[in-house]
Image (tube, rainbow, N blue to C red):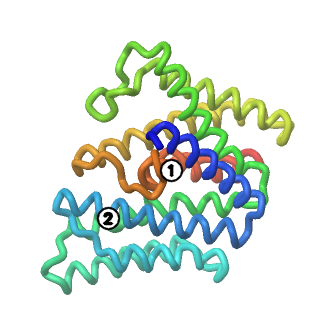
Amino acid sequence: MDNLKKRVLSGIIGLTFMIIVVLKGNILLNISLFLISLIGLREIFNALSNISINPVKWVGFLSCVFIYLSIYLQFDISILIILIALILLVNYVLNEKIHFIDISATFFSIIYIPCMLINISYLGNTRYIWMVFTIAFGTDTFAYLIGSTLGKHKLSPKLSPKKSVEGAIGGIFGSLIMTVIYSYYFVQNHFGLIALLAIVASILAQIGDLAASKLKREAGIKDYGNIIPGHGGILDRFDSIIFVAPIVFYFSKFFLL
């Protein structure tokens, strides 16, 4: 099976699974996000090790467990983040083999993956959860379509040579169109605010994509993994969703609910 067929087939399977998980919500959604976060942490830790950074892996994985348990144990995640920072600092002091860059990279990875993705859980059972995927996938799809047909000016040739300014603008308009259509049928108010959300989140989705690409380039890897045939690793597929999830949650919490 060639790479294009693998991408299409795995994309269809992944999209079907995502729809089922989001529709079911609750514990299935939380377990799925937890597993995605664990795999994502493993991928970023492996990438960092390629550039001589050695994250404190056990702290990262254990933190991921407690971050998702916080949904059920009902404790403030900000307190957990402070405890994680303290544990990392204790490790830094007591272990001579651990350097400051190691604990900094570990802390960043925890914030970047499980702390960002858990916002999808917070959106569970609300009509706004679908906006995370509408914005992220709308941006990716239209950026690719417009970029591959009309793209002439490189957006960031060193980080992602195939991305163009025209594609980036197309991604923003694609996100706007798909999100407004969704809100027309399922939200039915706040159109101006939702349009603003779609534009800002689309820009952040593309920044998330470029950030993940920059780390791959620095680490000297093509993909973060091979768990998704034709697409690579979790971070290759979820890089934009990671950035979109928190802004959709907090925007909906303060302006839409």
- On the picture, is 198 further left or further right than 59? right
Lower sequence index among marks 2 and 1: 2
Asked if marks 2 and 1 touch (Cβ < 8 Å), the reply is no
The numbered disc on residue 177 is: none
Q: Is residue 146 above or below residue 79?
A: above
Question: Residue at 29% of width from left, 75% of height from top?
Answer: 56
Residue 79, position as x, y percentages in the image: 51, 76
As measured in the structure, the alpha-carbon distance from the residue carrying label 2 to the one carrying label 1 is 16 Å
Q: Is residue 174 above or below residue 208?
A: above
Tell me the amino acid under the disc marked 1: Phe
Which residue was labeled with disc 2? Answer: 45
Residue 233, position as x, y percentages in the image: 43, 54
Mark 2, secondary structure of its residue: helix
Judged from this view, the residue extending furthest toward the left is 96
- On the picture, is 236 further left or further right than 195? left
Q: Is residue 92 above or below residue 185?
A: below
